[in-house]
Image: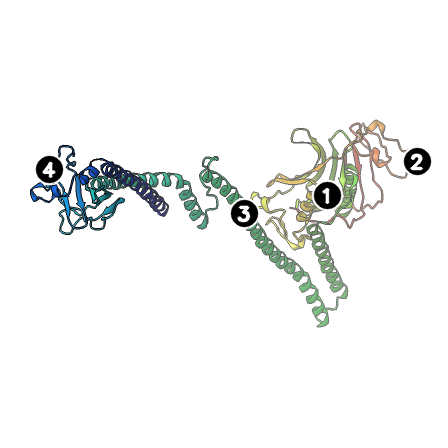
Amino acid sequence: MSLVLVITVLAALGLTGFSAVITTNLQRILVEQVDNQLESATQTWAHQTGDSGLGQWQDPSAQGSVPGNSGVARPPSEFYVRVVDGRYSVESFNSVFDSLPDVTSVSQPSEPVTVPARAGSASPAPWRAASVQNTDGTVTVVALSLEDEEHTIARIVFFQVVVGIIVLTLLMAASMYIVRRALRPLNEVEVTASLISRGQLGQRVPPGNPRTEVGRLSEALNRMLQQIQGAFVTVAASERQARKSEASMRRFIGDASHELRTPLTSVRGYAELYASGATDDANMVVGKISEEAGRMSLLVEDLLALVRMDEGRPMRQDRVDMLELALETAESTRAAFPGRTVKVENRSGYIPVVIGDSARLHQVLGNLLTNSMRHAGEEAETTVSLKTDANLAPNSVVIEVADNGRGIPEKDLPHLFDRFYRPDVSRSRQSGGSGLGLSIVKGLVEKHGGSITVSSVVGEGTCFRILLPRAPEDRPAVTAADAPSFPSSSTTPPVSASGETSTHGKKSAEKTGKASTKSSGGQKTSSFLSKWNPMGGKESKGGKKSKDSRGDSP
């Protein structure tokens, strides 16, 4: 509204100035016309009237005319004429004049000047008077009233005022419409800013014509709002992540403290039991304390592994033969859990090789196998399968660790990889788990650029599926025919099977087809008991316990 008022005031000033210039010039033109008439009169009939003799004007009956001289023209009716000789003065005028001029100041010859009307005149309009010196020494004064010119100027001014008011009214209305229409995007900007101030960061200014200033302003504001929203989202996400990390850290510290408190309480209890003399069985006390100390050691090592992963420490980048690693891990697991069956199958059609840290990948498979041994059930069989998936993961090595054991309830599956999480089924500290094994597995797999998923059916078994990026230039698969034969004097006793021959050689020749490890009671051996069949199968036995095979899984 203020802008409209400013426009109206400026327009009014402009119209006033224009009208003043027009009126002044018109008035000057009209006065010049009167002056021309006066100059023409002083040069013609007014001069002749003075020379005709003053005596002819002294008769009062002669007032208003030029008597008795046919050679002298009668003054026009609109003129006022006065002849002055120093002693007398004679004036001639039309009797219908509303006023007469006061020409006392015009006693000498002069150019046209403006004189006022005499006091008491009906019309206050001024007069224009001029005088001329006659040959007889008299002075003739002629005057014309400016009443008509004043009326003309007054009518012009009135017309200008009326027209100016109409023009200003129309201009104000048009200005209000144009300004409101032009500033409508700014009103939308104001509304949008108000909504954003209330927290609606997704609001945007409606786009305008990019060729206008308001349109370009809207575009710039939208870009700015987009950046501000992005910054707010980033900050909010950072704050949420910080709160989440803080809560996770508190929960982690609480869980770790709780896990450590239990074995520490046991150690303290057994020590106090022995110190109080309640038992004399020192071997039992020492054994229990050693068992709890071992549990604490494993927990601390798992915690350190998680800390190293969280710190993002770089790992070795070597070519790792996953079949060889699976066979070694299966043997270590077999040695730790006598009487349990672990099979290794290579269904990939080549020697699967990945780029990574062999020790960490051994820990991944070891944790999965150990967890299966602990929680799948005594009669369950576990199989490590190396596969390819041309459709979903053509450039990855697929590793599946599956068992046909108890399985895991569906409600526990989304939380299996959470730290310190234990499902209800056969998950307790007595089973040896801390709830960190699968968290470590997931972290190590992701460090290698892979992923891990789990599927399970209660009563049917559980399968962990790992995808790892495959290293380039894999070697072709080794068939059973390529495996070197062992001499008959080999100290490794062959395992008899119908239609199968016993062979043994380098590990590179043992890494294809199907291999299984099964215990032979309490027998201990430091080497694989193996045999090759037409499908490239291998069976291995061992009893040596490995320190690398620990972890948790359902």
Foreground of the two, 513 or 194: 194
386 with respect to 163 (left or right): right
Q: Amino acid at mark 2?
A: Ser
**Label at residue 333:** none
Between marks 1 and 3 in the image, the one whose residue lies nearer the viewer: 3
Q: What residue type is disc 3 on?
A: Val
- Which numbered disc flags the more N-terminal residue, 2 or 4? 4
The residue labelled by disc 1 is: 365
Q: Nearer the viewer, mark 2 or mark 4?
A: 4
| Depth check, front residue: 248 or 276 | 248
Query: Which residue position holds label 3?
Result: 233
Q: In the image, what residue type sits under mark 4?
A: Pro
Give the spatial CA distance, label 3 vs label 4: 110 Å
For marks 1 and 2, the one nearer the N-term is: 1
What residue is pinned by disc 2? 489
Q: Secondary structure at mark 1?
A: helix
Q: Residues within 10 Å of mark 2 (few under 14, many from 20)?
A: few
> Would residue 395 appear left or right of 22 to someone viewing this image?
right
Which residue is drawn at the image coordinates 26% and 37% (left, top)? 36
Per the image, the residue denoted by label 4 is: 67
